[in-house]
Amino acid sequence: MADTRRVTEPGRKKWVVPQRSPPDENKPSVRPPEKEAERSLAVPFRGHITGGMSPGKKVVMIGVVDSRPDRFYFALTCGRGTGGEPPVDVALELCVRFKDRQILRQACESGSWGETERAVPFFPFIRGLPFKIEIHCEHSRFRAFVDGQKLFDFQHRLTSLRDIDTLWIKGSVAITKLA
């Protein structure tokens, strides 16, 4: 989400995300707020996580990297934000950068971005190919897997897990399935 951030006040950034209507509470765990299935997984994507996160819960995204990728973002936030403003609390922002083959992770607490984590054992994303990301919520951390291989652990910086109720995805990726 860094490629479209604009500083709006010290420490605040603006995300360009389409506005959508409130979600229907009778849909699956991670769901787009609109009813049209084909448009629902369009990127940029913003969907509701029913009941928020909790230990034992996971978010799964199956997608395909664009043929000429730059970067893509995957974020778990507390709320949808207002207008073009991001929520003040971002539990995990994952930025996959293809040019330098990096996977950056960070969190934002009360509008203040913390330290960025960069270390990963491998870079699993290949242009034009499908992948599966699983973000498992545990008591003290998020644990990420790509195509079944552990990629990283990210210690919780926000402790109110149930407040983490929104999934954002944007960038050089097509989403084929969310769960």
Image (cartoon, rainbow, N blue to C red):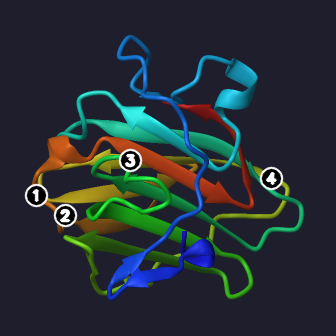
Q: Which residue is mark 4?
A: 129
Q: CA distance from mark 2 to mark 1?
A: 6 Å
Badge 1 marks a residue whose secondary structure is: loop
Residue 70 at x, y = what percent? 76, 74
Mark 4 Cα shell of 10 Å, populated few (<14), some (14-19), many (≥20)? few
The residue lying at 43 percent from left, 28 percent from top is 22
Badge 2 marks a residue whose secondary structure is: loop
Q: Which residue is mark 1?
A: 159
- Which amino acid type corresponds to the residue marked 4 in the rendered image? Leu
Q: Is the residue 89 above or below the residue 22 in the image?
A: below
The residue lying at 46 percent from left, 53 percent from top is 83
Please state the total of marks drawn on the protein image. 4
- Residue 12 shows up from this direction: yes
Q: Earlier in the sequence, mark 2 or mark 4?
A: 4
Q: Determine whether label 2 and label 1 are within 8 Å by CB.
A: yes
Lateral position of residue 2 relative to residue 86, left or right: right
Residue 172 at x, y = what percent? 74, 61
The mark closer to the camera, 3 or 4, is 3
Mark 3 Cα shell of 10 Å, populated few (<14), some (14-19), many (≥20)? many
Q: Which residue is mark 2?
A: 156
Q: Which residue is mark 3?
A: 80
Q: Give the quarter of the image for residue 171.
A: bottom right
Q: Is the residue 83 above or below the residue 56 in the image?
A: below
Lateral position of residue 76 relative to residue 35, left or right: left
| Depth order, front residue of 89/70 | 89
Badge 4 marks a residue whose secondary structure is: loop
The residue lying at 47 percent from left, 66 percent from top is 94
